[in-house]
Image (cartoon, rainbow, N blue to C red):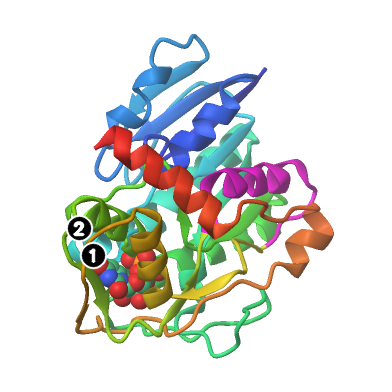
Amino acid sequence: MSNILVTGGAGFLGSHLCDRLVEENNVYCVDILASGRKSNISHLMSNRNFHFIEHDVRKQFNSDIRFDTILHFASRAAPDEYQKFPLHTLMTNSIGTLNMLELARKRGSKILLASTSEIYGDADVIPTAESYWGNVNTVGARSCYDEGKRFAETLFYIFGQQYGMDTKIMRIFNTYGPRIRADGYYARALPRFIMQALGNSDITVYGDGSQTRSFCYVDDLIDGTLALLRSKHPGPFNIGNPYEVSILELAKTVKELTKSLSKITFHSLPEDDPRRRSPDITKAKNLLKWEPKVSLKDGLHRTIEWFKSNS
Ligand code: UDP
């Protein structure tokens, strides 16, 4: 049994990771329950292999446990949310990442960073490969998240180079599935559209809806994370589903799958909203032997069913 620390372990992705890992490992879930929720991990609380620790990664984490692996997933990730807490977001990704790297260095742990497609900013090469350096605004609405994650990647790179540590970087593209939040500023487009459609209220498309995203079902994302963890490669690797859809198409698909009476309405486009986003996953296919398997319709269907019985 390995000792695995998952920061952000009560969040959407972190909790799915804990679910998978807890069968064969001692899992230490660290979270401050900001965007993470106790309900995501309540079913794990009685598991002997699962340990919840309420701790803010911006503070040093002192523990005698010898963690074999650290999965660093702690961060606010929804645009409305990180824009409401920009400094918190920037510091979680900078100081928080430094603290986790220092812990990994002391304990000799392998460490993986949940980075993001946002480090590419408003990319002008689509699909985007890992070799693309990014088109990012340092002083805009998304900077706290984009630059925080870029700084975190650089820290990972330096610790890997300077201390010979086993560091791994994955760049996560839009991911969805059960437990993704649909409430208030935590909501991203896809879960918000589902809740709007299920309640027959307006589906709020920003701009004309021609901007695109590529949505990866959570089970595929977890498979990709574990494939990277098992591999000998540091990355960075794009982990996402390359199937690109416009936001208007997404709204129409959600409306159709929920048989909703909602109207689709159009609202102003937020500042610095990337126009297109889709990963080139050739590197992950070749080196990790990983690719997503769940189609958008299938994943949406599963997610809609979850929302029907959990809201
Ligand atoms: N969006 C939208 N309606 C909403 C929320 C978001 O049309 O109610 C748009 C948003 O402007 C962006 C896309 O949907 O172009 C994806 O937004 P998401 O919240 O998933 O985050 P992002 O992919 O931009 O990080």
Quadrant of res 140: bottom left
Name the magenta segment's main secondary structure: helix
**Residues at badges 2 and 1 in contact (C-beta under 8 Å)?**
yes
Q: Can residue 56 be seen in this snapshot? A: no
Q: Dividing the image into four quarters, tell me where ligand 1 lies.
A: bottom left
The structure residue drawn at horizontal position 51% and vertical position 50%, both measured from the top left corner, is 299
Q: Secondary structure at mark 2?
A: helix
Asked whether mark 1 lies closer than 8 Å to ligand 1, one says yes
The structure residue drawn at horizontal position 24% and vertical position 43%, both measured from the top left corner, is 34
101 versus 162 height, above or below: above
Q: Is residue 56 left or right of residue 235?
A: left
Assess disc 1: are there few (<14), some (14-19) or many (≥20) residues with their C-alpha within 10 Å of its C-alpha: some
- Residue 197's x, y, as percent? 26, 57
Task: Out of 222 and 168, give the one closest to the viewer.
Answer: 222
For the image shown, how many numbered marks are present on the structure?
Answer: 2
Q: Which residue is mark 1?
A: 80
239 versus 304 height, above or below: below
| Labels 2 and 1: the sequence-earlier one | 1
Is residue 152 highlighted in magenta?
A: no
Quadrant of res 269: bottom left
- Residue 13's x, y, as percent? 46, 44
Q: Is residue 81 left or right of residue 224?
A: left
Indicate the quadrant containing the N terminus: top left, top right, bottom left or bottom right: top right
Q: Which residue is mark 2?
A: 185
- Residue 144's x, y, as percent? 32, 69
Range of the magenta residues? 216-235
Badge 1 amino acid: Asp
